Amino acid sequence: MAIDPVTGIDMSGSADQIAADVMAAEWAEWENTFKPIELAALQQSSLVNPQVLTDAVSKAQSTAQGTYAAMPGMLQRRQKGMGIAPTAEQTMASNRIMNVEGAQATAGAMNKARADVAAEDEQLLLGSMPKM
């Protein structure tokens, strides 16, 4: 009986039996070593865990909205510091413009978050290391 010292496989059998033993040893190694890593990686993808996408989009939305929520106050302080007193119509017009820009920035941030999550999912499926 000849046993391979590295794999521990009996090499004295038929070629079919040796091939089957090698395949079984490789499968066992994959299940014990790489399967847990792949399962952990999949749990980080939005394909298996939809909360990943939801969290990324809501974080992007709150960040963009938080940034634009401070804009009217900054504009008023800046104008006051320069001695500018806008009329009610001018204030309403600038507020409308800021609201449109804020909505555009929020939509852009949410779309970018969706695209980033899709790119991360693709990298995970291609075999990149998971974020552990």
Image: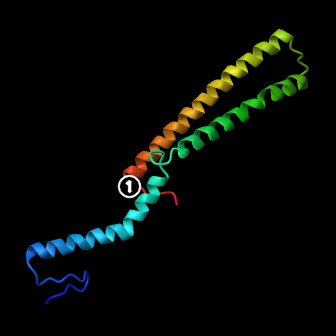
Left or right? Give the position of 41 relative to 4.
right
Q: How many marks?
A: 1
Quadrant position of residue 62: top right
Location of residue 19 in the rendering, given as x and y in whole percent from the top left corner: 15, 72
Location of residue 39 in the rendering, given as x and y in whole percent from the top left corner: 43, 58
Q: Nearer the viewer, residue 100 or 16?
A: 16
- Scheme of colours in the image: rainbow
Q: Residue at x 50, y 48 (%)?
A: 49
The amino acid at mark 1 is Gly
Secondary structure, mark 1, is loop
Q: Residue at x 17, y 71 (%)?
A: 20
Mark 1 neighbour class, 10 Å CA radius: few under 14, some 14 to 19, many 20 or more: few
Quadrant (top left, top right, bottom left, bottom right) of the N terminus: bottom left
Which residue of the protein is positioned furthest toward the bottom in this rendering? 1
Left or right? Give the position of 10 relative to 69.
left
- Residue with the mark numbered 1: 127
Location of residue 47 in the rendering, given as x and y in whole percent from the top left corner: 44, 45
Quadrant position of residue 15: bottom left
Q: Is residue 25 above or below residue 65?
A: below
Q: Is residue 41 above or below residue 70?
A: below
Q: Residue at x 71, y 18 (%)?
A: 97
Q: Residue at x 41, y 46 (%)?
A: 122
